Amino acid sequence: MSKEDRSVFEIELSIDNELKALYLEYLNIWKAYPANDLELHHEMIQQKIEGKIKQKPSSKNLYTYAAVLLIVLLSGFSIFFFSGESNYTNIKIAEAGQRLRFKLPDSSKVVLNSGSKLKYTQIFDNPREVWLEGEGFFEVTKDAERPFIVHTSDMKIKVLGTSFGINTFSKKQTVSLATGKVNVVLKASNDEVNLLPNEQLTYSATTHEITKQNFNPEKAMAWKENILLLDNLSLKNALPKINDFFGVQFSIIDKTLENQRITGAFKDQNIEEFISSMEFITNVKVITKKPHHYLIIASNEN
């Protein structure tokens, strides 16, 4: 199964309750056989699952995905769904330009930034684990008996009850702690770093460099209040933040504008309102090249 097919299946599984019910039935069948007996009972497991499929309504989509699941179950890819960190059936996705707020089963609060994805297990118990791609802010419900763990591609962040932000968009991943205490484990080296309130960890997967510094939570986490904060940045350095926030692509055509400074807190603005604000406070003009793609040129007005 390709990565793309797998992603489609995960999304279908997260939104289709009937498919999720089928998944759990197959999971129970799979778990009923000891790992060392799976080869011996391969045919028996296949017959049971096929029987389950035939008993279900003959909806084309549902049958198709059930068949896909059968293939996954009986192939080497089954480990993706049924072992360790990949046994998740719930997926939350913040679309481009969207800040998505929701609660996890333990009442922990999450805010996902534009273009981010969070996955978590159907059985959200002990430990409480989630997998993050992109940027998210977490207010974790305290539970000393059940640690809360956030996985990224390069780090594992363990907490009991706290609030913190994680950004994995760039080559350097950051963990920013607002309250409480977190333990960060770097997957490449197993090095551990503890963070206290108002401390931020930055890790480069390329150089394996680790830095820890103090930060301003209100500024760093303004995005979760739907505020784009640009603090005296050059246009060149501001564009990645702008592009991520709105889920669009700005390109500077006139390179002499790259060092033009921009400062402002843009709250609850859509892309058209932001463009008007940017043109007003800087010496630039924005041209729409195509949907979601904008060109920045020098303004003719003095």
Image (cartoon, grey):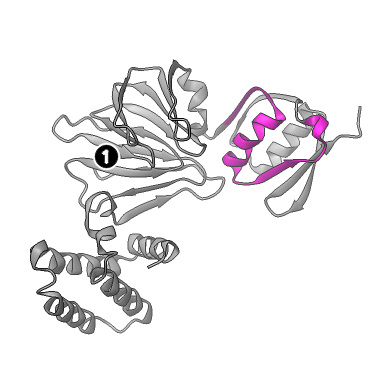
Q: Which residues are magenta?
A: 228-257
Say whether residue 256 is left or right of residue 197: right
Say whether residue 32 is left or right of residue 97: left
Judge the density around disc 1: few (<14), some (14-19), many (≥20) Cα neighbours within 10 Å.
few
**In the picture shown, does residue 95 fall above or below 255?**
below
Instruction: Say which of 216 and 201 sits in front.
Output: 201
**In the picture shown, does residue 29 fall above or below 100?**
below
Dot 1: element = loop
| Quadrant holding the N terminus | bottom left
Q: Position of residue 279 (x, y in %)?
A: 78, 33
Instruction: Say which of 100 and 199 sits in front.
Output: 199
Say whether residue 263 is left or right of residue 89: right
Which residue corresponds to the image point at 15% horizontal and 67% vertical from the top-left?
Answer: 30
Which residue corresponds to the image point at 27% horizontal and 39% vertical from the top-left?
Answer: 107
Which residue corresponds to the image point at 29% horizontal and 53% vertical from the top-left?
Answer: 86
Q: Position of residue 256 (x, y in %)?
A: 82, 30
Residue 250 lies in the magenta-colored region: yes
**In the picture shown, does residue 171 fall above or below 176?**
below
> Residue beneath label 1, please?
107
Q: Position of residue 70 (x, y in %)?
A: 26, 74
Q: Position of residue 246 (x, y in %)?
A: 60, 42
Q: Quadrant of residue 7?
A: bottom left
Amino acid type of the residue tagged 1 in the rendering: Ser
Instruction: Say which of 102 and 245 sits in front.
Output: 245
| Quadrant holding the C terminus | top right
Say whether residue 230 is left or right of residue 151: right
Residue 280 lies in the magenta-colored region: no
